[in-house]
Image: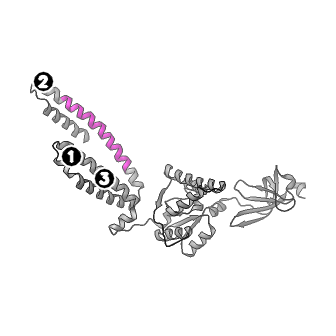
Amino acid sequence: MVVAVFTFGGHEIAQSIVTDETPGRLLLGAVLGATTGYVAGGILGRSVATLIGLAERQLARLPGADLVAGTLGGVMGMMVGALLGWPLLFIPLRPVGAASLAFLIIVLGSLGYGAGISKREDILQLFGLSFRTRAPDLRVLDSSAIMDPRLLECVRSGFLRGTMLVGQFVLDEVQAIADSADQVRRNRGKRGLEMLSALHREGLADLRVVDKMYPEFAEVDAKVVALARERGGSIVTNDVALGRIAELQGITVLSLNSLSDALRPAVLPGEQIRVAIQKEGRERGQGVGYLEDGSMVVVEGGKELVGSDAEVVVSSVIQSSGGRMIFGKPAGPAGS
């Protein structure tokens, strides 16, 4: 359709430009005009088809609330553009004025669409509308989850899906940690900011920053709970205290530590495991090592094995909020 319109348009323009009405010149002008229109229409048609395909894919991924808010914002932007640009129709060169008006409407419409999505709640409330993402699909991140590198892997692997909300107050907290004088805290903060950038850059999740600051609460944890309660979402955190407070208020809590513990291979008393003894333990004669999943292994009589791999017979396993600790003794003569 685009090619046909441009071909016909090129023919008509060429006919109007050619002043010499000699049949040969008229024919040549018509052919050149139609050919130019055909080529231009083909290029534009392919570009439009590509843009339409891209738009369809983006719309398929766009939540309904964002689509409605963006559409309302875009319509408002186009109306503002039309009101501001209508005098352009009265300039001497009417085609230039019309093109300028169309350009202004498109630009302001695009800006309005983007503003509608970024200020979704305000736009929807302005029109008396309210949309909520289904609670199971809405995750509210706190600073402990953001600074945990396992979050990125959970999203990449599909264990965590849906829309992820980050309060501006949480970002401020992570930024403060990234600016800390303590190197360990500074590295954790920077790692958290880099992880958020990776989530956004790779398009792994629908990541949104919420500007609302909840000034009625002083603590960041209370603000996180308020955000999750208001939006009807779950909280992703490694903070045990925050998790308990949220659960008391009926909010679902997803703990990365609990997920990691659940995925660890079971180790039972009497089993034999191989572990690298890395350092001495707190008690006399103890050696301490770690499994690949991070579990600490305390080996009675393992001091002499520091710096080497050893076969260890498990005597007991303790699970705590801080993780799993395994106690054992060397297998064979060393443990006799």
On the image, the x and y values in percent for residue 252 come to 55, 69
Give left or right: position of 113 versus 19.
Answer: right
Tell me where residue 224 appears, x and y as whole percent.
Answer: 53, 67
In the picture of the structure, the residue carrying the numbered disc 1 is 98
Magenta span covers which residues?
A: 31-55
The type of residue carrying mark 2 is Gly
Give the overall secondary structure of the magenta segment. Answer: helix
Question: In the shown orientation, is residue 302 left or right of residue 234?
Answer: right
Residue 167 visible in the displayed image = no
Q: Which residue is mark 2?
A: 24
3D distance between C-alphas at marks 1 and 2:
34 Å
Under circle 3, the secondary element is: helix
Drawn side of residue 87 relative to residue 317, left or right = left
> Marks 1 and 2: CB-CB under 8 Å?
no
Q: Which residue is mark 3?
A: 108
**Label 3, residues with CA under 10 Å away: few <14, some 14-19, many ≥20:** many
- Is 65 left, or right, of 326 in this rendering? left
Identity of the residue drawn at 19% across and 51% down: 87
N-terminal-most mark, 1 or 2: 2
